[in-house]
Image: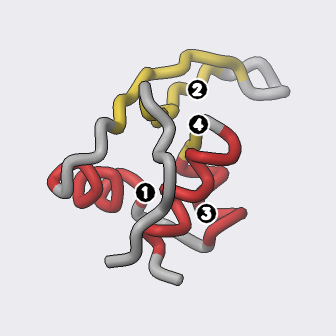
């Protein structure tokens, strides 16, 4: 299964994905590039920036990607 298909399946199941989730769950270390490819294919993937704090209190910021309309079916490349 291609990483694009895996990302779409993840979004269909969980609704959102972060770079950390993609790296750990899908072995995808270039989520932003894959999201760009999917957008070019017409998938309406959007991004929100999350501002949070790590357990030690230091600030962190990361992107959380989601689709307004979940895909009905995942189509291969």
Task: Kindly report the distance in space between the C-alpha atoms of the residues bearing marks 2 and 3.
Answer: 17 Å
Write down the residue under mark 3: 23
Q: Nearer the viewer, residue 53 or 15?
A: 15
Q: Earlier in the sequence, mark 4 or mark 1?
A: 4
Task: Kindly report the distance in space between the C-alpha atoms of the residues bearing marks 2 and 1.
Answer: 18 Å
Residue at the spot 68% in from the left edge and 47% down from the top edge: 13
Residue at the spot 56% in from the left edge and 46% down from the top edge: 11
Task: Kindly report the distance in space between the C-alpha atoms of the residues bearing marks 2 and 4.
Answer: 18 Å
Give the position of the C terminus as an image quadrant.
bottom left
Instruction: Check the image and name the residue furthest to the right.
Output: 55
Q: Which mark is residue 70?
A: none
Write down the residue under mark 1: 31
Between marks 2 and 1 in the image, the one whose residue lies nearer the viewer = 1
Disc 1 to disc 3: CB gap under 8 Å:
yes
Task: Kindly report the distance in space between the C-alpha atoms of the residues bearing marks 1 and 3.
Answer: 8 Å
Q: From the top left corner, tell me how far across and down residue 5 is, in percent.
A: 47, 68
- The local secondary structure at tag 1 comes to helix
Q: Earlier in the sequence, mark 4 or mark 3?
A: 4
- The local secondary structure at tag 2 comes to strand
Q: Earlier in the sequence, mark 2 or mark 4?
A: 4
Q: Earlier in the sequence, mark 1 or mark 3?
A: 3
Q: Earlier in the sequence, mark 2 or mark 1?
A: 1
Write down the residue under mark 4: 16
26 w.r.t. 38: above or below: below
Q: From the top left corner, tell me how far across and down residue 46 is, in percent.
A: 35, 30
Q: Is residue 62 left or right of residue 40?
A: right
């Amino acid at each position: 299964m291609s990483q694009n298909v895996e990302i779409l399946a993840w979004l269909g199941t969980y609704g959102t994905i972060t770079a950390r989730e993609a790296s750990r769950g899908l072995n995808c270390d270039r989520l932003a590039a894959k999201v760009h490819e999917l957008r070019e294919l017409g998938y309406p993937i959007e991004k929100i920036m999350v501002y949070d704090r790590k357990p030690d209190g230091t600030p962190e910021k990361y992107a959380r990607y989601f689709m307004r309309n979940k895909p009905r079916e995942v189509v291969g490349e």
